[in-house]
Image (cartoon, coloured by chain):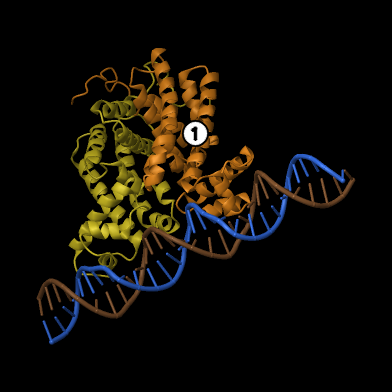
Chain colours: A yellow, B orange, C blue, D brown
DNA sequence: CTAAAATGACTGACCAGTCAGTTTCCTCGA
DNA sequence: TCGAGGAAACTGACTGGTCAGTCATTTTAG
C-alpha cells in the first residue's frame, strides 16, 4: 500500500479530481479514476486503502491548497477589506473554480454515505474550520482596526463564505458576469438598506 | 402504477423525507422507505416509477410548501425589510428546518447521479428559480420603495438565500444561538463596512 | 536475476426493480 | 344478512446487473 512515489499518488489525485468534479463522487467508479490516470484499477489500491480514502485524500489536498492560497493573500494584502476582495477572486480562479469542488467540500453532501461522513468529520472538518477561522481572523482584524463595524467575526465569515458559494453556483447556471460578482461583494460590504435606515442602532436585538 | 390514494402517496413521501434527511439519498434503500411507511417494497413501486421518482416527488412537495409559505409571508407583511426578516424565521422553523432538506434542494448534490441530475434540471430547477424569483421580487419592491439601496435584485436574492443556508448549516454544528441568526440578518442589511467608508461610491467597479 | 510495481479477471455483497402469489375490499344476488 | 366472486392493493422472494476490493500472474527496473 505504501508504494514508491508521492508523484504517482498526486497524479491519481489529479485524475480523481477531474473525474469526481465531472461526475460526482457516487457516480465515480474506482475504475474511472484508474483509467483517467492511465493505470489499472489494482494500482489505485496500492496508493489508497479504499474508495473513501481517495475522497479524503482529494479533499485534504484541495483544502491544503486553499489554506495556503488564503494565507498568502492575507499576508500580502494591505487592508482587511482588500483581503476580502482578493480572496473572492483568488478562490474562484484557483482551487475552488467550479461547483464540483464545492460539492466535495460540503458536508451535507457527504452525509450521503456513512463511512464518508465519519471520515469527513474526523479528517476534513477540522481543515474547513481552519479556513473559516482564517476568514474570521480577517474580519476580527478589520473590526479592531475600525475598517469594519463591530460584528460577530464568525457570523461575518460564515456569511462571506456563503455568499461566495452562492455566487459561484449561480454562475454555473447563467454565464458569469463580472457585474454579478461585484454586486455580491458590494452588498456584503455595504448592506442592502438604504442610507439613514437605522444603521446607528445595530444594538436593538430584541424587537 | 396509478394506484388509489393520494394519501398513501403522501404517507410514502413523509416516510421518504424522514429517511432521506436522516441518511441521505444515496444511503437510503427503497426498502428503508417502504419499512418506514409500514409497507412492503413492492408497494412503493405502485406509487413511484423508480427511486429517482421518489426523490423528485419529495423535492417537488417540499418546494411547493416552501413556495406557499413564502407567498403567504410576502402577502401579509408590511414592508420588504420585514418580509425578509420573517422569511428567515419562517423557513427555518418550517420546511427547511434541517440540513438534510437543504441537501435535497442543492443541485451540486444531485450532480452525484446522472438520471437524478437530468430530472432535477427538468422538474425541480424551475421551482427553485421560482423561489429565487419570489425573493428577488421582494428585493425589487424594496428598492423601488426606497427602503433598499439600488442593487441587483437577483444578486441580493442569491446572497440572501446563501446567507440563510450558511447560517442553517453552521447551526447544525454548534448549537443555534439566536444571536448568530440576528448577526447574519443584521450584516445582510447593514453590510460590514464601518460608516463613512465610501458608501456613496458604489459605482467604482474597476479598481 | 530479483524485487518492486502494476495488472485485470474474478468474487462476493448489495440492491433496484419485478411479478407470481396472497390478502383486502367491494359489489351484488339470493 | 350473508357470502361468492372478482378486482384492486399489497407482498416479499427472486433476478440481473453493478462494482469495490482481492490476488495470482506479469511487467518493469535496477
Badge 1 crowding class, 10 Å Cα cut-off, few under 14, some 14 to 19, many 20 or more, is many
Residue B50 in percent (x, y) is at 49, 47
Q: Is residue A205 visible?
A: no
Residue B73 in percent (x, y) is at 53, 24
Identity of the residue drawn at 42% across and 20% down: B137
Chain under label 1? B
Identity of the residue drawn at 44% across and 35% down: B123
* A103 w.r.t. A53: above or below: above
Counting every numbered tag in the picture gives 1
Q: Nearer the viewer, residue B207 or A154?
A: B207
* C11 w.r.t. B43: above or below: below
In this rendering, would B48 be left or right of C2? right
Q: Which quadrant of the figure contains the N terminus of chain A?
A: bottom left
The residue singled out by tag 1 in the image is B63
Identity of the residue drawn at 49% across and 34% down: B63
Residue B194 in percent (x, y) is at 32, 26
Location of residue A124 by image quarter? bottom left
In this rendering, would B33 be left or right of B139? right
Q: Is residue B43 visible?
A: yes
Q: Nearer the viewer, residue A195 or D26?
A: D26
Amino acid at each position: 500500500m505504501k508504494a514508491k512515489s508521492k508523484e504517482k499518488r498526486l497524479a491519481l489525485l489529479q485524475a480523481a479530481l477531474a473525474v469526481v468534479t465531472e461526475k460526482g463522487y457516487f457516480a465515480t467508479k474506482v475504475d474511472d479514476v484508474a483509467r483517467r490516470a492511465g493505470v489499472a484499477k489494482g494500482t489505485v489500491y496500492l496508493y489508497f486503502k479504499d474508495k473513501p480514502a481517495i475522497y479524503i485524500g482529494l479533499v485534504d489536498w484541495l483544502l491544503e491548497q486553499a489554506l495556503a492560497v488564503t494565507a498568502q493573500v492575507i499576508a500580502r494584502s494591505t487592508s482587511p477589506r482588500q483581503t476580502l476582495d482578493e480572496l473572492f477572486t483568488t478562490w474562484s480562479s484557483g482551487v475552488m473554480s467550479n461547483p464540483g469542488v464545492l460539492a466535495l467540500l460540503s458536508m451535507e453532501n457527504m452525509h450521503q454515505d456513512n463511512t464518508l461522513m465519519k471520515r469527513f468529520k474526523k479528517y476534513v472538518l477540522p481543515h474547513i474550520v481552519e479556513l473559516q477561522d482564517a476568514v474570521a481572523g480577517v474580519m476580527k482584524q478589520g473590526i479592531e482596526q475600525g475598517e469594519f463595524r463591530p460584528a460577530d467575526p464568525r457570523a461575518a465569515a460564515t456569511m462571506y463564505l456563503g455568499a461566495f458559494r452562492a455566487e459561484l453556483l449561480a454562475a454555473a447556471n447563467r454565464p458569469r458576469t463580472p457585474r454579478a460578482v461585484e454586486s455580491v461583494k458590494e452588498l456584503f460590504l455595504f448592506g442592502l438598506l438604504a442610507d439613514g435606515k437605522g444603521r446607528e442602532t445595530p444594538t436593538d436585538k430584541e424587537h
